[in-house]
Amino acid sequence: MTNIIIKSEPNFSPSIDAEIEGSANDYIHNDADGKHMRLNAHAVAKDKGTGALIYVNYTGVIAITPALGKILGGADDAKTTEFGDAFIEMHFETGEEKLKELETGLFVGAGRFIVEQGQPVTVEYKVSKVVKGSA
């Protein structure tokens, strides 16, 4: 994994604007039936506002669709995918008090693969915190 940015929306608290420090690890394997990939990613990010280090882990599942097959195979006609075939659950750990609330939240996300000619494929996740609804 390279060029990873974790940035909260403007009104989210606690605010985070972090980039991965050093190397990140991701482990990906396909299910035996070839219909899904399983993800397990780990990284340490540094928050720009506090300077704090944040351990980030996410696990997820991605449907192996014909469109994803084209992307992974490097096909000339590969195109950006829509959100809806890739989902993750994200966890945070930090020693920074201002960011501790991240550790107690449940965060889930949906992803897509972005294909731009002449650029490496980018994976974008929109991540949300699960909150209690009103009755």
Image (spheres, grey):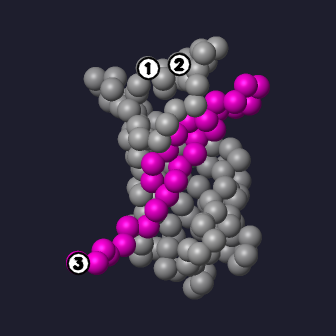
Separation (CA) of disc 3 from disc 2: 44 Å
Q: Amino acid at mark 1?
A: Pro
Q: Amino acid at mark 2?
A: Lys
Separation (CA) of disc 1 from disc 3: 41 Å
> Relative to residue 65, is residue 111 depicted above or below?
below
Residue at the spot of label 2: 70
Q: In the displayed image of the protein, which residue is found farthest to the right?
A: 118
Percent x, y of residue 46:
69, 66
Query: Which residues are the magenta region?
Result: 109-135
Residue 79 in view (yes/no): yes
Q: Which type of secondary structure does the marked residue at label 2 adopt?
A: helix
Q: Residues within 10 Å of mark 3 (few under 14, many from 20)?
A: few
Q: Are marks 3 and 2 in contact (CB under 8 Å)?
A: no
Q: Nearer the viewer, residue 113 or 88?
A: 113
Residue at the spot of label 1: 66
Labels 1 and 3: the sequence-earlier one: 1
Side (left or right) of 39 relative to 17: left
Work out which quarter of the rendered image holds the N terminus and state it. Answer: top right
Could you tell me which residue is drawn at 56 percent across and 74 percent down? 12
